[in-house]
Image (cartoon, helix red, strand yellow):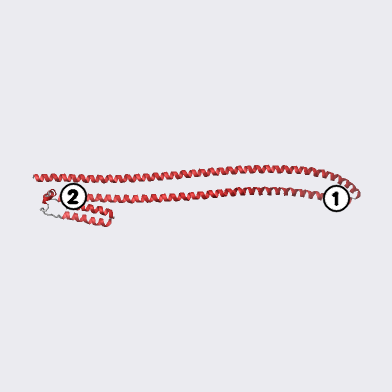
Amino acid sequence: MNVRAEAEEQYQTAVRAHLQMVSALIDVQFQRIKTIEREFRMHLRMLEEEFDTERAEIIASHMRLKKEMLAIMAAMEAEFRQAEAEQKQEFESQREEIKNRNSEEYNVLKISLESTVEELERHFEQAHQAYLASTDARTQAFKQLTERDAACARIIEKRMRKLIRLHEALAHWRVKIMSNSREWEQRNKELKAEKDKMNRHYKDLKTRMNRFRHGEYEKLKILCVASGRTIKALKEKKRVVSKMLRLAEVNGKMETEQEKIVPFFPNYVSSVPTIRLPELEMVENEFKGEAVDKEDSVPSQPKTETTENEQGERSALG
């Protein structure tokens, strides 16, 4: 009875030690899972922060470039308005100058012509009187020719004024076309160079963004694959531990008094007969079949871990 009580006490001690080891292993596994999950969340947060920072920098750069472009456009528009105002002012001054000069020349010519006309009128009047005295027919012809001459003079004067206006307008538009063509040609060259520069900058920025997006996608894919493999391995280990506990419970129920004493007395192992129970054989065969199926289905690394677990279970059953 003392030997049996001592064996029972040793058995209970071994069971408690075994349960403590199993509990410690489970705690270690939970700690590993929590550590891996914490690292995953930390890497995810770092990626999100880097993405938000890059996005904020890109938006700030875009707004800065937009503000610069608007400032350049406003400056160019103000410069154009100033140049237009200066050209208009210059045109108006030249126009007034030409108008005043023409007016002065016209007045001088008018005065000289009026004096000449008055003198001619006196001569004509004298000649007219002499002419009337000589012949009346020639007088009538002279009146007709005078009226015709006046009409021709008016037509010539009108056409001369029109010709002068056309010459002035032609000279003005030639000068304006030349100045505008030079100015707009230079501005078109500058705008084209700036457009090419902006296109190159946009292409470079787009290439960098695509390269960064592709790298982050590859990192996330690798992280997801590693996380999935880790979760599968942990589930498999949990299933194996549960099976080991169930086998230990079944083994404990089926042990005889001698089998309960044998593990604590190695010298008597050769003398104890081996008893094969049908329930235990069925459980072993089921476990072996599942181990073979798992070897065929899982990758190389999980397969090695499962094989080691099976060897541990078999040694425990033996």
Few, some or many residues within 10 Å of mark 1 (<14, 14–19, 20+): some
Which-is-in-front pick, marks 1 and 2? 2
Which residue is depicted at the point 32% across and 50% down? 226
In which image quadrant can residue 34 be found?
top left
Q: Please state which of residues 142 and 205 is positioned toward the viewer in this rendering.
A: 205
Few, some or many residues within 10 Å of mark 2 (<14, 14–19, 20+): some
Q: Amino acid at mark 2?
A: Ala
- Residue beneath disc 1: 142
Mark 1: secondary structure? helix
Q: Quadrant of the N terminus?
A: top left
Do tag 1 and tag 2 residues touch (Cβ < 8 Å)?
Answer: no
Give the image location of residue 171, x and y in percent: 68, 48
Q: Amino acid at mark 1?
A: Phe
Which numbered marker is on residue 248?
2
Residue 259 lies left or right of residue 102; in this view the side is left
N-term-proximal mark, 1 vs 2: 1
Which residue is depicted at the point 9% across and 44% down? 2
Give the image location of residue 62, x and y in percent: 48, 45
Which residue is depicted at the point 79% across and 49% down? 153
Which numbered marker is on residue 70?
none
Give the image location of residue 93, x and y in percent: 68, 42
Residue 41 lies left or right of residue 313; in this view the side is right
Residue 18 lies left or right of residue 125; in this view the side is left
Which residue is depicted at the point 71% across and 43% down? 99
